[in-house]
Image (tube, helix red, strand yellow):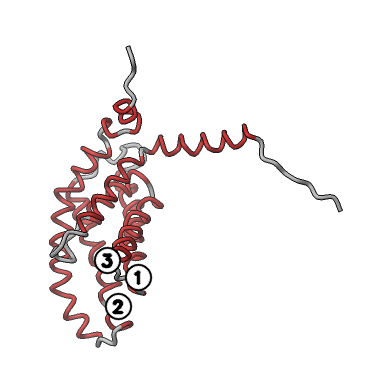
């Protein structure tokens, strides 16, 4: 039996690499990365209330602009990295990260349907972000708040339910407030800002010589 050795041609590899780089270039992932890092750093601020955080408010406009996978990854990786950095990794990490990631998928579908295929998200209003923040927060807290305690710590369900009420109230206040103020600003001044485009940044660091 004769073995056939396959050696990839250099032009083929270059074509694949070029396509990959151009896709990153086209999507302007710099904005996405900056938003991700900013949310993670804010969550690492000491003595911050655990349910006052801008993840959902940042995730919503990025989910609309970058799609389902990016929306899921934004929150999922943020939750996982935070637990790794703070040494709090457990089974609850997978539950909370997955739940928040699914909100990203939902946000992408929700705002795409809300804005239509041709508007580019420009007709999304602050109230639309606030409505999704209410639905998303309630869904997240029901899935995580009423499961982690009873499943992993033997907490009675009614005790978990009663204890979840003030937590969810504060969570709603924070997420809705951020959604009304922060989400529209992120879309307008970050996602739509041409100065943060990859091409513009490359021109700053590599100015043309006259």
Q: Nearer the viewer, mark 3 or mark 1?
A: 3
Q: Quadrant of residue 133?
A: bottom left
- Quadrant into which the C terminus falls: top left
Q: Which residue is mark 2?
A: 148
Residue 110 against residue 147 in the figure, above or below: above
Q: Nearer the N terminus, badge 3 or badge 2?
A: 3
Farthest top residue?
210
From the viewer's perspective, tell me whether residue 191 is left or right of residue 28: left
Confirm or deny contact between disc 1 and disc 2 (CB under 8 A).
yes
Residue 134, position in %: x, y?
Answer: 20, 61
Name the residue nearer the viewer: 86 or 197: 86
Q: How much space separates mark 3 and mark 1, taking CA atoms?
A: 17 Å
Q: Nearer the viewer, residue 208 or 33?
A: 208
Q: Which of the two labelled residues, at mark 3 and mark 1, occupies the earlier sequence position?
A: 3
How packed mark 1 is, by other alpha carbons closer than 10 Å (few <14, some 14-19, many 20 or more), is: some
Question: Whole-Å distance between the Cαs marked 3 and 2?
Answer: 19 Å
Image coords of residue 87 (percent x, y): 30, 69
Q: Earlier in the sequence, mark 1 or mark 2?
A: 1
- Tell me which corner region of the image, top left, top right, bottom left or bottom right, holds residue 84: bottom left
Residue 190, picture quadrant: top left
Sort mark 2 into few (<14), some (14-19) or many (20+) by Cα contacts within 10 Å. Answer: some
Secondary structure, mark 2, is: helix
* Dot 3: element: loop
Label 3: which residue? 86
* Residue 11 point in image, percent of width and height: 62, 32
């Amino acid at each position: 039996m004769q073995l056939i050795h396959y050696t990839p041609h250099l032009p083929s590899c270059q074509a694949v690499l070029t396509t990959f780089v151009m896709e990153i270039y086209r999507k302007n992932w710099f904005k996405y990365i900056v938003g991700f890092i900013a949310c993670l750093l804010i969550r690492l601020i000491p003595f911050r209330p655990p349910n006052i955080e801008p993840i959902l408010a940042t995730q919503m406009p990025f989910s609309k602009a970058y799609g389902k996978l990016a929306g899921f990854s934004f929150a999922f990786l943020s939750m996982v990295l935070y637990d790794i950095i703070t040494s709090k990794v457990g089974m609850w990490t997978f539950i909370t990260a997955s739940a928040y990631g699914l909100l990203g998928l939902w946000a992408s579908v929700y705002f795409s349907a809300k804005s239509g295929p041709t508007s580019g998200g420009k007709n999304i209003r602050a109230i639309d972000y606030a409505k999704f923040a209410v639905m998303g927060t309630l869904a997240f807290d029901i899935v995580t708040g009423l499961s982690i305690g009873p499943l992993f710590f033997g907490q009675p369900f009614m005790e978990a339910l009663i204890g979840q009420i003030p937590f969810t109230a504060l969570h709603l206040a924070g997420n809705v407030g951020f959604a009304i103020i922060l989400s529209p600003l992120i879309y307008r001044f970050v996602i739509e800002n041409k100065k943060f485009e990859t091409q513009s940044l490359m021109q700053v660091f590599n100015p043309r010589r006259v």
